[in-house]
Amino acid sequence: MVDAVLGALALLVFAVPASALDSDGASASHASRAPAAAPAAKKPPTLRKTYWKLVALDGKPARTFKDQREPHVVLDGTEMRVSGSGGCNNLVGGFEQDGAHLRFTQMAGTMMMCPEGMEQEAALVKALESAARFRIAGDALTLIDARGKAIAKFRAGTPR
């Protein structure tokens, strides 16, 4: 009896042509299988709720110093607050946005002294306070002052 069942099972297995099976070996004609979804396209970053890593200030490359956080900002869209790090100190404040116009307000930070990076941090705070507009192209955010000069550039990324 066991031999008869195994024989019938073998006959069923070999009776289904390989072209009728999907990549999992299941019958491709199985009606409950949904078609494979195409991979989701990567959404471009938005001004708000994106981790923006500082990459340049006044046309000069930004640096991350030993034993310090990388300089960055994150704009919270619901609270209209900005937070981040200058590298040595944490930064907080508010912001106002109207289209491409952007203004940072009430910027403050902790007041630690670090052996390196203090000049860059001060320049970042000055750039934030001087920003009048912004532009996002690809994964890059550029802050622009009232004269139209690019004063800070950031790249969308993940916290390090």
Image: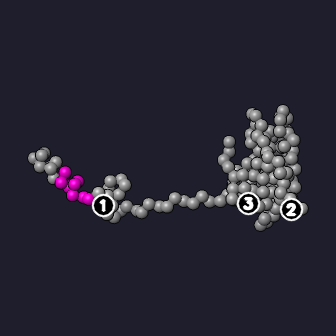
131 displayed left or right of 27: right
- Residue in the foreground of this view, choosing between 75 and 5: 5
Q: Is residue 69 visible?
A: yes
Q: Quadrant of residue 96?
A: bottom right
Which is nearer the N-term, disc 3 or disc 1? 1
Location of residue 136 with respect to 68 vertically, above or below: below
Q: Are marks 1 and 2 in contact (CB under 8 Å)?
A: no
Q: Residue at coordinates 54% horizontally, 59% vertically from top-left?
A: 40
- The residue to which callout 2 is attached is 148
Residue type of the residue flagged with mark 3: Ile
Give the SS element for disc 3: strand
Q: CA distance from mark 1 to mark 2?
A: 63 Å
- Chain part drawn in magenta: 9-17
Q: Position of residue 81 (x, y in %)?
A: 77, 54
Please name the predominant secondary structure of the magenta segment in the image: helix
Q: Is residue 128 visible?
A: no
Q: Residue at coordinates 75% horizontally, 52% vertically from top-left?
A: 154
The numbered dot on residue 20 is 1
- Residue in the foreground of this view, choosing between 70 and 140: 140
Residue type of the residue flagged with mark 2: Gly
Q: Position of residue 84 (x, y in %)?
A: 76, 47
Q: Residue at coordinates 40% horizontally, 62% vertically from top-left?
A: 34
Q: Residue 155 in magenta? A: no
Neighbourhood count class around disc 3 (C-alpha, 10 Å): few under 14, some 14–19, many 20 upward: some
Task: Please state which of the two labelled residues, at mark 3 or mark 1, is closer to the viewer.
Answer: 1
Q: Are marks 3 and 2 in contact (CB under 8 Å)?
A: no
Q: Residue furthest left?
A: 1
